[in-house]
Structures are given as structure tokens and as C-alpha cells.
Image: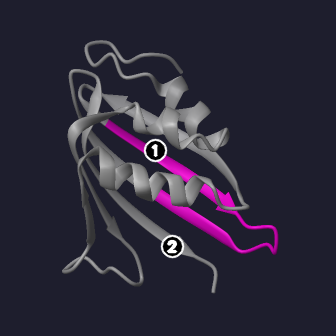
Amino acid sequence: MGTAAGSAFDVEALRRGIEGQSADTLLSLYADDAEIRVVDRNTQPSHPKVMHGRNEIGEMLGDVYSRDMTHKMENCVIQGDQVAFTESCEYPDGVKVLSESMMSLRDGKIVQQTMLQAWDE
């Protein structure tokens, strides 16, 4: 996978950030005014967790990618200024997490992301 025509989004940087557990690499893909909405068992669709701007997003990425777990980008699809990808994760004790994200881009940077995630309990 490379850069999408017209969007200048770097899919390989996304993969490197996820699989290399580099919050800094991932944060570089977001616009200053980006927003992430997270929906899961604890933050349901009517009350998602919402992070605004690179500072809040950076805190979340720093937390997630500093954990003792593996991360893998399994699929990524780009169409125009829309990106969707699947991420699978596993903790050392075997607990698995699956995440699906849909993102909107502006000038090749992520401006909006909705993430749905589920994990073993």
C-alpha cells in the first residue's frame, strides 16, 4: 500500500505507527483540529468518548501504544479522502482487542476518526 491519489495520506506511516507502537508517528498523521470518537462497551454510541485536538489525541495514543501488547494493521482501504482500517491487538495473557476505524482526511491529514472497538472479557 502506498499513498492514495489525491489525498497524500501515508498508509505505510499508519502501518509503521501501529505495528511499531509509535504514538509520535501516528500523531503526525492528525491535523491540529482533529477529533476522534470511540465507541465500545463502556462508551456507547449515544455517549462516545470524544477527543479533540492533537494534545488529547496524543495522550490517548501514548497510553494505548505504551501498553505491553502487540498491534497489527490487518486491512486498509482508501477512497478519496476517506480511510478505513482494521487493527488487531493482543495482550501477553491472550486477551484480544479488535478495532475498526473510519477516517476523514483534509490535505492528507486525519481530521475525523470514528473507532469501534471490542475486546475479550
Secondary-structure class at tag 2:
strand
Residue type highlighted by circle 2: Ala
Q: Residue at x 40, y 75 (%)?
A: 40
Secondary-structure class at tag 1:
strand
Residue toward you, 78 or 49: 49
Magenta region, main secondary structure: strand
| Residue tagged 2 | 118
Q: Earlier in the sequence, mark 1 or mark 2?
A: 1
Total marks drawn?
Answer: 2
- The reply, left or right, for residue 75 in relation to residue 49 is right
Q: Quadrant of residue 52?
A: bottom left
Q: Quadrant of residue 82?
A: top left
Find the magenta span and give its range: 83-100
Q: Residue at x 55, y 51 (%)?
A: 87
Indicate the quadrant containing the N terminus: top left, top right, bottom left or bottom right. Answer: top right
| Residue tagged 1 | 85
Q: Residue at x 47, y 38 (%)?
A: 26
Residue toward you, 53 or 101: 53
Disc 1 residue crowd, few under 14, some 14–19, many 20+, Cα 10 Å: some
> Furthest residue to the top?
5
Residue type highlighted by circle 1: Phe
Q: Is 14 covered by the magenta stretch?
A: no
Between the C-alphas of marks 1 and 2, the distance is 15 Å
- The reply, left or right, for residue 86 in relation to residue 72 is left
Q: Is residue 67 above or below residue 111?
A: below
Indicate the quadrant containing the C terminus: top left, top right, bottom left or bottom right. Answer: bottom right
Whole-percent x, y for residue 8 in the image: 33, 16
Whole-percent x, y for residue 46 in the image: 19, 80
- The reply, left or right, for residue 8 in relation to residue 35 is right
Q: Is residue 107 above or below residue 90?
A: above
Q: Is 91 covered by the magenta stretch?
A: yes
Q: Residue at x 25, y 25 (%)?
A: 80
